[in-house]
Amino acid sequence: MKNDRFITVVCCSLMMSPVYAASWAPDARGNAMGNTGVTTADFLLAPFYNPALTAVYRNEDDFGLLLPSVNLNVRDEDDTVSLTDDLQDTISQFEAAGVGSVDSTTIAKLDHYLDELSDNQSLGASGGLGAAVAIPLQTVSLNIYTRGFVELIADPNIAASTGSSASAVQSRYQSSSVDLIAFGYTEFGVALARKYEIQQQLFSFGITPKYQWMRTYKQVVSVKDFDLDDYDKSEVKDDAFNLDLGAVWLKDAYRVGVSIKDLFSQSVETYDGLNSYKLDTQVTVSAGYVGEFLSAAVDVDMTKQERFTGKNDDTQFIRFGIEGNAWGWGQLRAGYEIDMKNTLDDSVTVGIGLSPGDVVSIDIAGSYAGENQFGGSANLAFTF
């Protein structure tokens, strides 16, 4: 099980589900700007951040199409994928030779790999796809979209060493396992928004009624047989109706906004009832500047996302982003993201955009949070 195979499996797992994207917005522009967007996203990407932005558009905008938006993030701080692959190869050599005739080097390698894995942190991955169609109107602007995400967490559970003999090492790896838990999510919704002038101040308010499909998966397999392909063998399903709300105040190039995602919290248990995934209500406030040549934003999560119970994986972010725009034809972007719960390391993000003729937009982004922690995303969008 090599690193490239691991990434392939994650991508394939997304395709096996209806339509998946990451738990953050599947948007290369926002991803490059530190995953900001509550006040700076455009009308086509508005539902991913703040439905109120669906009504914030230029005079020349009549229609928008996002097809597709893709991203992938991998967190393997201790190189668990490669270690597990090496361990499985060595187990194959061990069993081919037989307990009675295996050499001491192979036994020592097995023990070494098991020792290394016993200290490893969780392996995590997420990624997905998204699409949207937007029609900005003076009466009520709308955006029909779909998105979702899949998250995988794998924890090695290595048995303690009872000796260095062939039989002791064999018993150790046979008693060692990997706990794999995953959550898959899909949503389909329609963002509706309109601008209002209140006391000579311009506001936009939005709402997104949406339907959610949620899935949990859980598997405990021996390290010898561990394969990410098998993550979906214990599926538990749940569906729900939900709402997103948003508002933004606009003053020249300055903006202040708030977004409330998943007004009704959801929770889905695993098949054994020992874990669950919590989709909490998320409140994010933002301040932004959107000018002709420069845009900048600060987004702050006011609530945490609990995610998997019993996994110590709560997250709550503060995000910073900036974009330089060369007359609408090309963009350079950068950002920084901080998890205030310290579950994820601080992340640096960068990206570029190409928008020849202001009709076709191609956006690419990447993120880096240390060795073996990386991400990437890409968008293809059309506006008319």
Image (tube, rainbow, N blue to C red):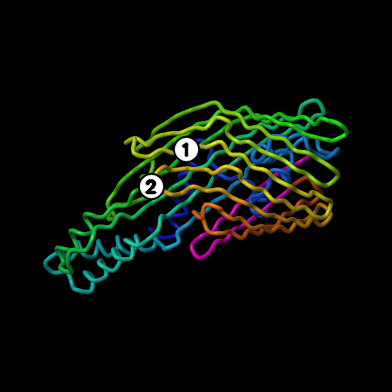
Q: Is residue 339 above or below residue 116?
A: above
Which kind of residue does numbered mark 1 sit on? Lys
Q: Nearer the viewer, residue 77 or 250?
A: 250
Up-down relation of residue 259 to residue 138 (above or below): below
* Residue in front for this viewpoint, 83 or 153: 153
The count of marks equals 2
Q: Say whether residue 271 is left or right of residue 348.
A: left
> In the current view of this chain or complex, which residue is farthest to the right?
200
Q: Does the magenta segment cover residue 362?
A: yes
Nearest-to-viewer mark from 1 and 2: 1
The mark nearer the N terminus, 1 or 2, is 2
Q: Is residue 147 left or right of residue 102?
A: right
Residue 318 magenta-highlighted:
no
Residue bearing mark 1: 278
The structure residue drawn at horizontal position 33% and vertical position 44%, both measured from the top left corner, is 219
Disc 2: which residue: 229
User: Which portion, as a residue range, is magenta?
Assistant: 361-384
Q: Residue at x 71, y 57 (%)?
A: 333
Cα separation between marks 1 and 2: 24 Å
Which amino acid, by three-letter code, is at mark 2? Answer: Asp
In screen coordinates, is 226 left or right of 287?
Answer: left
